[in-house]
Image (cartoon, grey):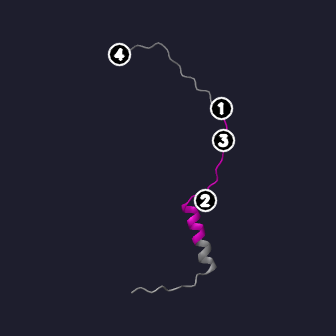
Amino acid sequence: MWAIVEVPVSMKDRIKTAELLGKSYGMFTDKKEINASLDIDVGVGDWDAED
């Protein structure tokens, strides 16, 4: 039969656990919104087609 044993956890361990959980869920990533316009010029011209 199994027994449940409670182990005291230090504040340092709690903080580290919260940090690792936050990193794994991506809670601390900075998101930046960039608004920009970009003109794309596609040139189509005459060329010699090789058969």
Nearest to N terminus: mark 4 or mark 2: 2
- Identify the residue at image location x=56%, y=67%: 20
Nearest to N terminus: mark 3 or mark 4: 3
Viewer-proximal residue among 13 and 38:
13
Residue 17: image location, x then y, percent: 57, 71
Q: Amino acid at mark 2?
A: Met
Callout 3: few (<14), some (14-19), or many (20+) C-alpha neighbours within 10 Å?
few
> SS at mark 3?
loop
Seen in the picture, residue 20 relative to 2 is either above or below; the reply is above
Nearest to N terminus: mark 1 or mark 2: 2
Q: Is residue 20 left or right of residue 2?
A: right
- Identify the residue at image location x=49%, y=14%: 45
Q: Amino acid at mark 3?
A: Ile
Q: CA distance from mark 1 to mark 2?
A: 30 Å
Q: CA distance from mark 1 to mark 4?
A: 37 Å
Q: Quadrant of residue 26?
A: bottom right
According to the picture, the residue beneath numbered tag 2 turns out to be 27
Nearest to N terminus: mark 1 or mark 4: 1
According to the picture, the residue beneath numbered tag 3 turns out to be 34
Give residue 28's mark.
none
Q: CA distance from mark 2 to mark 3?
A: 20 Å
Q: CA distance from mark 3 to mark 4?
A: 44 Å
Whether residues under marks 3 and 4 lie with C-beta atoms below 8 angstroms apart, the answer is: no
- Identify the residue at image location x=57%, y=23%: 41
Callout 2: few (<14), some (14-19), or many (20+) C-alpha neighbours within 10 Å?
few
Query: Foreground mark, 1 or 4?
Result: 1
Query: Foreground mark, 2 or 3?
Result: 2
Region rendered in magenta: 17-36
Q: Amino acid at mark 4?
A: Glu
